[in-house]
Image (cartoon, rainbow, N blue to C red):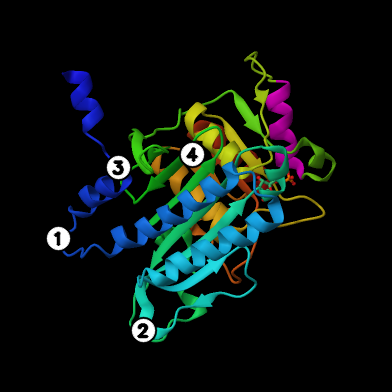
Amino acid sequence: HEADAYRTDLMTITRFVLNEQSKYPESRGDFTILLSNIVLGCKFVCSAVNKGEEQKKLDVLSNDVFVKALVSSGRTSVLVSEEDEEATFVESSKRGKYCVVFDPLDGSSNIDCGVSIGTIFGIYTMEHSDEPTIEDVLKPGNEMVAAGYCMYGSSCMLVLSTGTGVHGFTLDPSLGEFILTHPDIKIPNKGNIYSVNEGNAQNWDGPTTKYVERCKYPKDGSPAKSLRYVGSMVADVHRTLLYGGIFLYPADKKSPNGKLRVLYEVFPMAFLMEQAGGQAFTGKKRALDLVPKKIHERSPIFLGSYDDVEEIKALYAAEENN
Ligand code: P6P
């Protein structure tokens, strides 16, 4: 009966989060309602991607679904989407205590060739009950209360942290439920994979160039690292989280702040990496300590296994000192 018991103990994402939230006696279920609307958006995008919708339509569709689901949840006040130039301020009758920053379909240029893509999101709480302003989302990542991504690949997997570790849920299409399949994910302390777009190598700065050189031609006799680069952040970060190693999108001469967006790419992935025992660095500081000035601001990012990121931090520190 053990196997049967396992199969009938359906730990859905909603049930899991309710358990987590029950640790906070004052919680009134708002976060659970917010999350269930994010989950609804992910289920919609998963089915649309699997229907083979073409990229342009999918980009707009997925953004619409997430904005509508979040506004109608009645638990949000400010939304920032990669797809919208300006932030969305929820009308007063529908306002709630959370602010959500998200990329509804990250890596969407990969859709038409069937490469995995994803939704990335981060959640802040509003600390006041006045009119919401843009300041409510221009906060450091260290003030995020939750973050996650949903990867639309061979299976649909939602990876989430509410500040007590990282947990992976796989969509069971027959139930339409995300079921806990990867409890308490921890990233290996060190990995043998590096993940970067080598096509930008001629524009990299010294420390990045030195680090990648070491990955390819190790001085200490250790084996060279493998290069794995999908070009879809959710896929590259998910592999890094599960297998270990380092993902980097460095600054380069053409783009001194790199390419990835602080609020809805760098912060959520940095949050997850730290919760899984890894770390995330910008080349100058801990990624979660960045304070964004603009909602679509970019930052260089080095994230993954703790020891691997330590190496790149040492190279940047050495450059600072000389
Ligand atoms: P590049 C996809 O367009 C994206 O925003 C991320 O998902 C991905 O990590 C990065 O850009 C890839 O950028 O310059 O290597 O094609």
Which one is closest to the eye, mark 4 or mark 1? Answer: 4
The magenta stretch is 205-217
Dominant SS of magenta comes to: helix
**On the image, numbered disc 2 is attached to which residue?**
93
**On the image, numbered disc 1 is attached to which residue?**
25
**On the image, numbered disc 4 is attached to which residue?**
156
Please tell me which of labels 3 and 2 falls first in the chain. 3
Q: Residue at the location (65% across, 22% down)?
A: 225
Please tell me which of labels 2 and 1 falls first in the chain. 1
Return the x and y of residue 288 as percentages of the image width and height: 49, 55
Q: Secondary structure at mark 4?
A: strand
Please tell me which of labels 1 and 3 falls first in the chain. 3
Q: CA distance from mark 4 to mark 1?
A: 32 Å
Say whether residue 33 is visible.
yes
Q: Secondary structure at mark 2?
A: helix
Please tell me which of labels 4 and 1 falls first in the chain. 1
Amino acid marked by disc 2: Ser
Marks 1 and 3 close (CB-CB < 8 Å): no
Q: CA distance from mark 3 to mark 4?
A: 14 Å
Q: Would you say residue 316 sits in the magenta stretch?
A: no
Amino acid marked by disc 4: Cys
Position of 95 relative to 235 (above/below): below
Q: Is residue 320 left or right of residue 78?
A: right
